[in-house]
Amino acid sequence: MDAVYSIIPAGVFSQVFVGLSRTTILFIVASGLTLILGVLRIPNVAHGSLYMIGAFTAFSVTKLTGGGSEGFWLALVIAPLAVACISLIAERGMFQFLYEREHLMLLLLTFAISLIFGDLVKLVWGSEYKSVPVPHMFQGFVPLFGGLPFPLYNLFLLAAGPVVAILLWLLTNKTKMGKIARAAAVDREMVGAVGINVSRVFAIVFVIGCYLAGLGGVLVAPTVSVTLGMDHNLIMEAFLIVIMGGLGNIWGALLGALIFGLTQSLGILIWPKFGIIFPYLAVVAVLLFRPTGLLKSTW
Amino acid sequence: MLVVNGIDTYYGLSHILFGVSITVNRGEVVGLLGRNGAGKSTTMRSIMGLTPPKEGSISFNNEDITGRKPYQLFRKGIAYVPDDRRVFADLSVDDNLEIVFRGGPGWDKERVYGLFPALGDIKTRRAGNLSGGEQQMLTIARGLMGGPKLLLLDEPTEGLAPLIVRELEGQILKLRDAGISILLSEQNVRSALKMISRAYVIDNGRIRFEGTVEELEADVEVKKKYLMV
């Protein structure tokens, strides 16, 4: 390996891994967003808020259980489910009446909801920074790449990404529900005309998509300060990823998240001060050459 | 079995159907004939609840079904085969059949593939890659999976090669023999006359003729004016 490092510095490998763990979070959140966008055609701006609620709920659950690492695992189960419950109420209470409306209406509605959720989070949790402890078994660092320390928790994230991707693949390709959702993404009227209650299918897909937002929120919580405003940053990135990958395409979301995560982490090496612009340059480049996204859109 | 009673249907503000009334009895194949744009497809869509009528009523097996949702009508035994086919292109042939709501015993994949052996040979193929004839068979097969009592067939032979049309005619007659009532819309009058026992002729959203095939054959004026034969 030392020979390799003499050509490519070990730090590059380390940054690739940092980028890949960021990719995991981005993919999990963006896949939920693209699922909802593809099947229900809702551009859900409130998706970021659900991610934030997932992170704050994780904070509360770990705090209530004494701040230990068991708390994190409990939060990993509870917080996404809590987010799913909130989304179910929103879907049955509001969205289900609006599917036939134009996209602008839905966009405005979800934007309003995101503002309301933002204020509710402020009311419930206040505006101070919160932190969620890294679970015990993933605390510390491992020496990787010429001895550079790499956070163990990030390795856990690296493993979580493919697991979610495989589960999503099984869900959309191997279950009847997933096949119905794929058909409804393209022709919801005809799915209704073969006896399927499309409204119920939509509710299920919406809840699964929002569950992913909550899951992303819990997973990111130990690596960042949990704070108001984390929803805005993420929803921008998630939308760009979804657009870059092709609307409604889960694999597009994966590809987009990879591009975004890697350009972000490697950009910092190239130009430390302005590393943050590289993902956006990548988006511009992709959209210039493939305006409809890298993979096939369901729209 | 199916009684459509004076329905008026609109697309947005444009008035398409004017007081259309149609009756289909059990075990009958009834033709809905007319030129392109006469209102055949709109009639079909109105019955299926896809474009619900603003006026009039529809009943099925003596039950008022006006304003019911398409999925409820399918579960009651009405299957709709649209003229533009609309297979679920991303799914395989087999999955197109699998996701249909199953109404109960009667039709399953085995029986459907028995009726359309050509489909059985391409089960795993992506539906979007099938030929026009294969897609037409698949949309009919998909409708059958729900165990329908009434089949709404919207121009099934449109755009198909003569050989395939002949094959399809045979299959439609088999469905009739299996006890399924059929409302068949067609521009292709010669093909339709081989299958139907009664006919309605529609033009500009109004029913202009109703009667048996013999009566239609004898009515030179109707044939000339509305069907161009």
Image: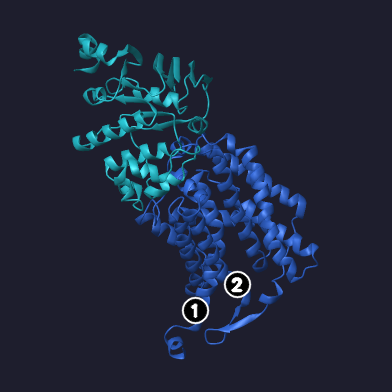
Chain colours: A blue, B cyan
As measured in the structure, the alpha-carbon distance from the residue carrying label 2 to the one carrying label 1 is: 17 Å
Residue A79 vs residue A191, the one in the foreground: A191
Instruction: Write down the residue under mark 1.
Output: A13
Q: Is residue A66 left or right of residue A235?
A: right
Q: Earlier in the sequence, mark 2 or mark 1?
A: 1
Q: Is residue B19 above or below residue B79?
A: above
In the image, which is nearer the foreground, mark 2 or mark 1? 2
Name the quarter where the C terminus of chain A is drawn.
Answer: top left
Q: Which of the two residues, B61 or A121, is positioned nearer the viewer here?
A: B61
Looking at numbered disc 2 in the image, what kind of residue is underneath it?
Phe
According to the picture, the residue beneath numbered tag 2 turns out to be: A156
Q: Quadrant of residue A54?
A: bottom right
Work out whether disc 2 and disc 1 sit on a shared chain.
yes
- In percent of width and height, residue A125 lies at 76, 55
Q: Secondary structure at mark 2?
A: helix
For the residue pair A66 and A73, the one nearer the viewer reads as: A73
